[in-house]
Image: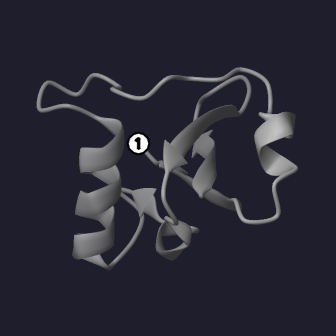
Amino acid sequence: MKTIIIWDQCGQDALTFFVVDGDLSHLNEVYINGNEDEALVDELNNLVYDNKGQCVLKVYKRFPRKTSMNPANKIIVAGFLP
């Protein structure tokens, strides 16, 4: 099972996407700097960024359609608010 993350970042010209292993549907609608649940924000932050603030996931510019065709995979929206 995989999770497609539609990455919604304020100030971005276009959406970007990540594909990660496992079911991360509990992170749906979690925004760094925008949610009250600090544990979920920390989990998302640690998933996407290293300790220097660099993205550690492969960034897809186009929606990973083939991955989305598997009904076992999840699709969520998460992101970063400045």
Q: Which residue is rendered at x = 49% and y = 75% of the image?
A: 26
Q: Nearer the viewer, residue 36 or 39?
A: 39
Residue 59: percent from left, percent from top: 56, 23
- Residue 40 versus residue 55 in the image, above or below: below
Residue 18: percent from left, percent from top: 57, 36
Query: Could you tell me how many numbered marks the image carries?
Result: 1
Horizontal arrangement in the rendering, residue 70 relative to residue 17 (left or right): right
Name of the residue lying farthest toward the left: 51
Q: Which residue is rendered at x = 35% and y = 26% of the image?
A: 55
Q: Nearer the viewer, residue 22 or 13?
A: 22
Quarter assignment of residue 3: bottom right
- Residue 16 versus residue 23 in the image, above or below: above
Residue 60: percent from left, percent from top: 65, 23
Q: Nearer the viewer, residue 76 or 53?
A: 76
Q: What is the secondary structure assignment of the residue under circle 1?
A: loop
- Residue 42 versus residue 48 in the image, above or below: below
Horizontal arrangement in the rendering, residue 56 relative to residue 22 (left or right): left
Residue 40: percent from left, percent from top: 32, 70
Q: Which residue is rendered at x = 79% and y = 24% of the image?
A: 62
- Residue 58 versus residue 34 in the image, above or below: above
Q: Which residue is mark 1?
A: 82
Q: Quadrant of the N terminus?
A: bottom right
Chosen colour scheme: one colour
Badge 1: how crowded within 10 Å, few (<14), some, or many (20+)?
few
Q: Quadrant of the C terminus?
A: top left
Q: Amino acid at mark 1?
A: Pro
